[in-house]
Amino acid sequence: LHNYPSVEFVIKKLRHTPCLADCAYCNAQLDVHRSLKSLFGYDAFRTYEGEPLQERAAQAAVEGRSLLAIFPTGGGKSLTFQLPALMAGLSVHGLTVVISPLQSLMKDQVDHLRRRGIRAAAIHAGMQRSDIVQTLENAVFGGVKLLYISPERLGSELFLAKLRHMRVSFVT
């Protein structure tokens, strides 16, 4: 990667792009149901009035389509971006940056993900600078798969400098 940096782009495109023909690798790696079970331990997506809206939103994200998902509070919106983000992260060894204005929501999400064995972290205004630097270093070196940040962090020179060295799969 150091000598041929453009290889990273090619590999990323190949590893998270389904084949044109039926392919066992693609069927396994890009299967939202399989990943839902292996990453979160759930057997099925939630439905709303019989409609598989959560599944459709997750599948659209895996396929790289733009989407707007509006679910009730506690309705499983987070899963619709966390699952595709983690799937992409596994395939290209990247992380997802999640921008959230609510510290309590970030904390709840990170705690939930960590209980499931998923490497997640948050950076917010209430943290010491040394903890922020350590979290960013972990993200740079692959120790974090989902990094939650507050919107104002996008104006931080420290964050932006470290972001340049992160392998980001998604920003949500």
Image (cartoon, rainbow, N blue to C red):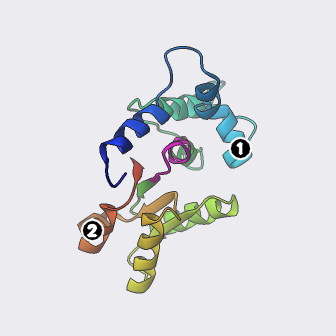
Q: Quadrant of residue 37?
A: top right
Density class for disc 1 (Cα within 10 Å; few <14, some 14-19, many ≥20) is few
Q: Give the Cα separation between the discs numbered 1 and 2.
A: 34 Å
Q: Residue at x 73, y 42 (%)?
A: 42
Q: Amino acid at mark 1?
A: Ser
The numbered dot on residue 117 is none
The numbered dot on residue 38 is 1
Q: Amino acid at mark 2?
A: Ala
Q: Quadrant of residue 21?
A: top right
Secondary structure mostly seen in the magenta stretch:
helix
Q: Residue at x 65, y 30 (%)?
A: 28
Residue most toward the top? 21
Residue highlighted by disc 2: 161
Q: Secondary structure at mark 2?
A: helix
Coordinates of residue 93 in the picture (x, y in percent): 50, 50
Nearer to me, 60 or 17: 17
59 up-or-down from 1: above or below? above
98 up-or-down from 36: above or below? below
* Residue 89 covered by magenta stretch: yes
Q: Is residue 85 visible?
A: yes
Coordinates of residue 158 in the picture (x, y in percent): 28, 74
Horizontally, residue 36 falls left or right of residue 89, namely: right
Mark 1 or 2, which is nearer the eye? 2
Nearer to me, 5 or 64: 5
Coordinates of residue 159 in the picture (x, y in percent): 31, 69
Density class for disc 2 (Cα within 10 Å; few <14, some 14-19, many ≥20) is few
What stretch of residues is rendered in magenta? 84-95
Answer with mark 1 or mark 2, whichever residue precedes in sequence: 1
Q: Is residue 172 visible?
A: no
